[in-house]
Amino acid sequence: MIEIEDKFFSNCKAKCYDEKISREIWRQMESFAGYSFNKAHSASFAVESYQGLFLKTYYPLEFMVAVLNNYGGFYNRKVYVNEARISGGNICLPCVNQPVFNTSIQGKDIYPGFD
């Protein structure tokens, strides 16, 4: 931030921006600087977001089963079960005859796990 401060104010002055407004904008940017992410973190988060959205868009049931097997996310597990139902999944009762302990999917049938 120190390296670009002079350039910021000289560019603002060259464009005839009000100095009071320029100082306020700089103050806000400076206060945010402690929370900003580095480029590597931002880039990896962008890739992860894109991949997650791709899977949720084209494989919504499998995505929701994976979220449930990862013990949910931000929301309560029933939100993800409801999202799977809305996406066309048939939510079955847990079944002792299923060979897996976690939530599983067979076609459009989703069997909640015993975890």
Image (tube, grey):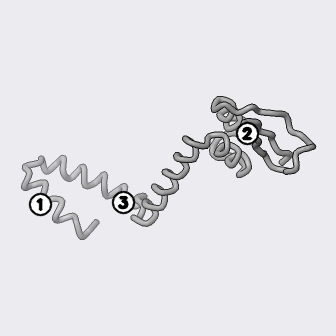
Answer left or right for 30 relative to 77: left
Query: Mark 2 and mark 1 in contact (Cβ < 8 Å)?
Result: no
Q: Residue at x 69, y 31 (%)?
A: 85
Residue hosting label 3? 33
Between marks 2 and 3, how big is the CA–CA gap?
48 Å
Residue hosting label 2? 107
Q: Nearer the viewer, mark 2 or mark 3?
A: 2
Frontmost residue, 67 versus 25: 67
Q: Is residue 2 above or below residue 58?
A: below
Query: Mark 3 and mark 1 in contact (Cβ < 8 Å)?
Result: no
User: To which quarter of the image does residue 106 belong?
Assistant: top right
| Disc 3 element | loop
| Disc 1 element | helix
Coordinates of residue 96 in the picture (x, y in percent)? 92, 43
Answer left or right for 4 relative to 113: left
What's the amino acid at mark 3? Ala
- Answer few, some or many: residues within 10 Å of disc 1's Cα (few below 14, many 20 plus, some between 14 and 19): few
Coordinates of residue 32 in the picture (x, y in percent)? 37, 55
Residue hosting label 1? 10
Q: Residue at x 8, y 51 (%)?
A: 15
User: To which quarter of the image does residue 11 belong?
Assistant: bottom left
Q: Residue at x 16, y 48 (%)?
A: 20
Between marks 1 and 2, how big is the CA–CA gap?
62 Å
Of the image marks 1 and 3, the number of the one nearer the N terminus = 1
Answer left or right for 24 relative to 55: left
